[in-house]
């Protein structure tokens, strides 16, 4: 079950993540000790809460990846479920959408992950964008309620595309048969997740340290040019430095990590715009224990499918 | 029948309902307490009672019984089993209470209903009551029936706790039997009581407002 533990490169990746977590925990507690009672206190508490959350998320992710393809699939299916649950709760739906939503949660979503499990690439690639997206509008229409019809159909289609279809491309990396890299596909998934998530983290850190000029303050008041450029460049540097764990050359790795960072940023920006639109800011405060999974993975949802297809196009014969 | 033990099926259903509804519970106006209470809430889904019941600590669950409409919950063997054996429901004849609202106050034909509910309260039980009397669409609260008022007058020692259940109408709306697992919220409000000399309709309006004011999403 844990045969991946014999993969020395994977162990190095894990060790690196562990070292990073330890380092940030130390920095977090030093900051906490230094600033006992001043204005920056709430930022530091927030930082430490994030670091604690990262320990938990990394542990769950590490175990899931170690259990192999099934573990990764189950983990991502659960994340898809939780993300779509958040999304559909926030997006206004009507009574007539009920059965379509039931299908989305209990048929379409499991089927998508099942198709990856049985490695049926052809159907995996078209099931949601072609079949599900054609199924959804008539299945709402048959319930007879035409109010805001196009809006409702599109909202459900978008939710499934982002939370299920796009995200499922991350574990689908395990399907790719890259010559000379057959037994190491878990590293590719780890590479994508590390670069993508570190890009988010580093954008946050750079933004907090030197952020001044807002990028799109109407959409997301916390995003600054300094944070964006600093975060993307340092995460690209990190991704480049991880080339040894991938089938890429250092140059290819630099280009791909840069792409992951930019796509991740646009994912975050898109989801922020949606949150602004439906007034989720208040809602996010209300359901504090639940909110947040979509915030965590929005960047991955945009980066995973394109990373998957670029790697498939250039590295799978 | 007194309800001092929890049926295993009840615990199972409570766990399932909590999982499906992802409910986040907030004790905004009071704390969990073993004193006798009447929890009164908005009603829009079959999940309402189970989710509310599951939000209570287990020692309180054991003494908290739902008020169930007799015509609906006695109509099939499964419903009867759930209401009677699993949740120790107190059955109420909705027809009689409707007639009562049209009756002259002095010839109060719903009297025996209040007596039944008071008897169910006994010395240690709490009740869960949906004063709208039926499930609504979840968008707007319906008018409250008078049972809550009469019960409160009959047992002034029992605390009346308003509860708002949010989003459950989207998870399992009336007329559907398969749930969609969205997230929901449950808020316990500040207990109210009948003020000295307060008229029935004034109290019922106030009780309704106490429930409605707990709404957290989409509130005006």
Image (cartoon, helix red, strand yellow):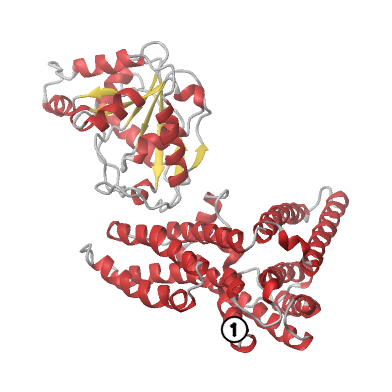
Give the quarter of the image for residue A27: bottom right
- Whether residue A104 sits left or right of residue A270 in the image: it is left
Q: How many marks?
A: 1
Query: Can residue B55 be spotted in the picture?
Result: yes
- Whether residue B192 sits left or right of residue B142 in the image: it is right
Given residues B58 and A81, the one toward you in this image is A81
Q: Position of residue A103 (x, y in %)?
A: 35, 60
Q: Where is residue A94 in the image (x, y as percent from the top left)?
A: 31, 59
Query: Can residue A216 be spotted in the picture?
Result: no
Q: Badge 1 sits on which subunit?
A: A
* Label 1 sits on residue: A312
Give the quarter of the image for residue A307: bottom right
Residue in view at x 69 percent, y 68 percent? A190
Residue B204, relative to residue A288: is it above or below?
above
- Identify the image quadrant of the N terminus of chain B: top left
Residue in view at x 50 percent, y 68 percent? A118
Residue A32, relative to residue A164: is it above or below?
above
Q: Where is residue B209 in the image (x, y as percent from the top left)?
A: 35, 38
Residue in view at x 33 percent, y 36 percent? B208
Q: How crowded is mark 1: few (under 14 residues within 10 Å), some or many (20 or more)?
A: some
């Amino acid at each position: 079950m844990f045969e991946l533990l014999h993969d020395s490169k994977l162990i190095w990746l894990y060790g690196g993540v562990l070292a990073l977590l330890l380092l940030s925990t130390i920095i977090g507690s030093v900051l906490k000790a230094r600033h006992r009672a001043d204005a920056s206190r709430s930022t530091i508490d927030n930082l430490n809460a994030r670091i604690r959350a990262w320990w938990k998320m990394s542990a769950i992710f590490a175990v899931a990846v170690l259990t192999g393809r099934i573990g990764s699939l189950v983990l991502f299916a659960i994340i898809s479920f939780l993300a779509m649950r958040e999304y559909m709760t926030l997006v206004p739906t009507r009574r007539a959408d009920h059965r379509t939503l039931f299908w989305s949660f209990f048929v379409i979503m499991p089927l998508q992950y099942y198709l990856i499990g049985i490695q049926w690439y052809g159907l995996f690639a078209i099931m949601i964008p072609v079949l599900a997206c054609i199924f959804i509008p008539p299945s709402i229409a048959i319930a007879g309620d035409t109010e805001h019809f196009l809006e409702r159909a599109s909202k459900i289609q978008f939710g499934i595309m982002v939370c299920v279809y796009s995200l499922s491309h991350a574990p689908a990396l395990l399907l790719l048969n890259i010559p000379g890299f057959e037994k190491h596909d878990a590293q590719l998934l780890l590479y994508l997740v590390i670069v993508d998530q570190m890009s988010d983290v580093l954008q946050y850190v750079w933004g907090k340290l030197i952020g001044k000029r807002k990028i799109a303050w109407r959409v997301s008041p916390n995003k600054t040019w300094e944070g964006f450029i600093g975060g993307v460049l340092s995460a690209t540097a990190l991704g480049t430095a991880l080339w040894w764990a991938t089938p890429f050359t250092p140059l290819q790795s630099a280009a791909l990590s840069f792409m992951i960072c930019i796509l991740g940023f646009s994912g975050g920006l898109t989801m922020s715009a949606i949150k602004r639109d439906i007034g989720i800011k208040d809602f996010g405060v209300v359901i504090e224990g639940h909110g947040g999974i979509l915030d965590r993975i929005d960047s991955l949802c945009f980066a995973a499918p394109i990373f998957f297809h670029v790697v498939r196009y250039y590295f799978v014969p | 029948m007194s309800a001092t033990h929890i049926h295993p099926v009840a615990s199972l259903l409570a766990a399932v309902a909590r999982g499906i509804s992802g409910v986040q519970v907030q004790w905004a106006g009071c704390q969990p307490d073993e004193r006798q209470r009447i929890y009164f809430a908005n009603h829009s889904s079959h999940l309402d009672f189970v989710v509310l019941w599951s939000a209570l600590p287990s020692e309180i669950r054991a003494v908290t019984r739902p008020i169930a409409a007799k015509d609906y919950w006695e109509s099939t063997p499964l419903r009867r089993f759930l209401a009677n054996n699993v949740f120790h429901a107190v059955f109420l004849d909705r027809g009689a209470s409707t007639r009562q609202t049209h009756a002259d106050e002095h010839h109060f034909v719903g009297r025996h209903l209040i007596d039944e509910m008071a008897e169910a309260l006994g010395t240690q039980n709490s009740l869960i009551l949906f004063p709208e009397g039926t499930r609504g669409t979840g968008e707007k609260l319906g008018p409250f029936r008078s049972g809550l008022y009469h019960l409160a007058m009959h047992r002034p020692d029992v605390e009346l706790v308003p509860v708002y259940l949010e989003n459950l109408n989207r998870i399992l709306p009336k007329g559907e039997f398969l749930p969609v697992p969205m997230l929901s919220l449950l808020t316990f409000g500040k207990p109210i009581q009948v003020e000295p000399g307060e008229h029935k309709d004034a109290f019922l309006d106030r009780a309704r407002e106490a429930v409605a004011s707990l709404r957290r999403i989409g509130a005006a």
